[in-house]
Image: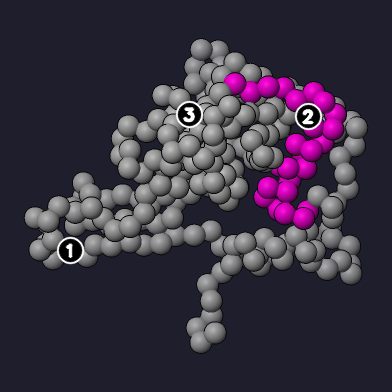
Amino acid sequence: MRDPDSPGPASPRVQLHRHPERARYDRKTVDAILDEALICHLGVVMDGEPLVLPTGFGRVGDTLYLHGAATNRSLAAALDGVCITVTHVDGLVLARSAFGHSMNFRSVVVRGRARAVTDPEERRAALMAVVEHGIPGRWAEVRQPSAKEIEITTVIAVDLAECSAKVRSGPPLDPVADHHLPVWAGEVPLRLVAGAPRPDPQLAEGIDLPPSVAEVRRRFPGPTPAGA
C-alpha cells in the first residue's frame, strides 16, 4: 500500500510534467482541495467518445462517492475507467505582456475505475457524504431518503489511490526585460461568497434558519463592512 504522504506520484498517469514544481502529491493537500470544492467534473468514455459532466460528490476517507439516477449512463461508464477533476480559481494574474497572463488555482486529478456501491449501509453513508459535503449538518435537519429513493439511485465509489494536485500562487512571472514597461501587473484575488438566504415561497411560517445555513455563510463569508 502506497504511503499517502509520499512526495512522489502514485503512478505515471498522475505525474505532472508541465510545471512540475507546482505538483503536490501528498494526501493532506489533495484532501483539502477536494473538501473545499462544491462540484467535480466526471470524465468518462461513452460510445467511443469522451464526455465530461459536472456533478456533486462526497469524500469519506480514501473514497469519493458520486450518485445519480439509476438510468445514468455516465456513472455506468465510470466502472470501465474514470477521471475526476476539481478546480478552485483563487485569482487572476495580470502580466505586463499578453502571453504572461495566468490564474492562481488549486486543482486535483483523480484517475481509476469506479465500483458500484451495492451494500445498503454504504449506499446510505455515501448519500449522506454527498449532502454533508456541500452543506455540513444538513443531513440531520431533513427527511431521510426513503427505500424507494435509494432504490432508484446509482451510487459509485472511486478510490483515491491515483491522484495528484497542482497549485499556482503568487504574482506574474514576467521576464526581467518587461519590468520597465508602463503596464500594471499583479493579482486580482477571487473567492466564492454566500449571499443572503432566500426562503422557499412555500415555506411554512415560524421556521427559522437552520444551523446548516449559518455554517454555509460562515464557510463563504461576504466582504467585511468598512469600519468593522
What crowding class fits label 3: few (fewer than 14 Cα within 10 Å), some (14-19), or many (20 or more)?
Answer: some
Mark 1 residue type = Val
The vertical placement of 192 against 23, above or below, is below
Spatial distance from mark 2 to mark 1, Cα to Cα?
54 Å
Is disc 1 surrounded by few (<14), some (14 to 19) or many (20+) residues within 10 Å? few
What secondary structure is found at the residue carrying circle 3?
A: loop
Which circle's residue, 2 or 1, is located before the other in the chain?
2
Based on the picture, tell me whether residue 204 belongs to the magenta stretch.
no
Where disc 2 sits, the SS reads: strand
Residue beneath disc 2: 153
- Does residue 110 show up? no
Q: Residue at x 62, y 29 (%)?
A: 159
In this view, the residue in front, 85 or 18, is: 18
Residue that extends furthest to the bottom in the rendered view of this protein: 227
- The residue singled out by tag 1 in the image is 183
- State the extent of the magenta-drawn residues as a range: 113-138
Amino acid tagged 3:
Ala
The quadrant the N terminus occupies is top right
Q: Which amino acid, mark 2?
A: Thr
Residue at the spot of label 3? 10
